[in-house]
Image: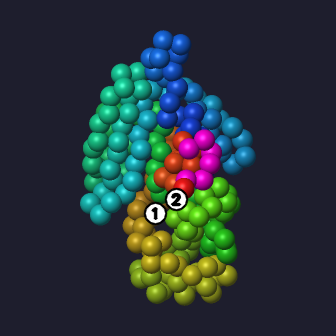
Amino acid sequence: MPKSGGFLITVDSLWKSGNSSGEVNSVRTGVMQRGSIVSKTVDCVAGVDGFKKGWRAVFHRISTDTWLTRDFKTFAELRAAPEAPDIVCIDMPIGMPEYTASGGRLCESEARARLGAKASSVFSVVGRVPLSFATRGEADSASRLGGGIGVAAQAWGLASKLKEIDLAMSPDLQQLVFEVHPEVCFWAMNGRSQMS
């Protein structure tokens, strides 16, 4: 399990790449992972988000420019999908501190700095210790007692998904699954400029 974390994936290089004939054969991505750049060639990318009944994934097979949307009950089912994505971009915090300090994780503060007026769309993750409690009230009290920030309703609404991802992550899985944020993706696709 990652103890703290967050990743910035340069989706501007991920979302479009082609050769001189205009055909897209594969995508070379640059992934900023804890300060270092990791490069890999990919053909299938999955964009994933949690929802009430499980996980929704949109798969893009770059070599054939085909798209497929599927729902999964668990993250484990998604990982075993026959589409076998080379990269999974998930709109969910990955890696959390025991208690979340003011301002949140570094990746959250960096995302906010890039988003300007849209900065409020990035909220701080619930710390691992508060996440172990059954109710938001208990989690909020535990976080504050541990020196962390309060637990917002929006963040607590993700509690079951956060626990599922946190239990699933491993060092190997960190080479496949990356935390992304839609507003940061839009910023990147907008020439690394704030959206108006």
Of mark 1 and mark 2, the one earlier in the sequence is: 2
Nearer to us in this view, 108 or 84: 108
**Residue 169 image point, x, y percent:** 50, 51
Nearer to us in this view, 188 or 160: 188
Q: Which residue is mark 1?
A: 162
User: Magenta part of the protein: which range?
Assistant: 190-195
Please state which amino acid type lies under the numbered disc 2. Answer: Pro
Q: Give the residue at x 54% y 42%.
A: 189
**Residue 151 image point, x, y percent:** 52, 79
Q: Give the residue at x 60% y 53%.
A: 194
How dense is the environment of label 1, judged by Cα within 10 Å: few (below 14), some, or many (20 and up)?
many
Q: Give the residue at x 57% y 33%.
A: 13
Q: Which residue is mark 2?
A: 93
Q: Give the residue at x 61% y 85%.
A: 144
Q: Nearer the viewer, mark 1 or mark 2?
A: 2
Q: Is residue 77 left or right of residue 181?
A: left
Contact (Cβ within 8 Å) of mark 1 with mark 2: yes
Q: Is residue 159 left or right of residue 128?
A: left
How dense is the environment of label 2, judged by Cα within 10 Å: few (below 14), some, or many (20 and up)?
many
In which quadrant will I find the N terminus?
Answer: bottom right
The image shows residue 160, relative to residue 142, as above or below, that is above
Task: Confirm whether residue 84 shows in the render.
Answer: no
Q: Is residue 165 left or right of residue 193?
A: left
Q: Quadrant of residue 96?
A: bottom right
The image shows residue 41, relative to residue 144, as above or below, that is above
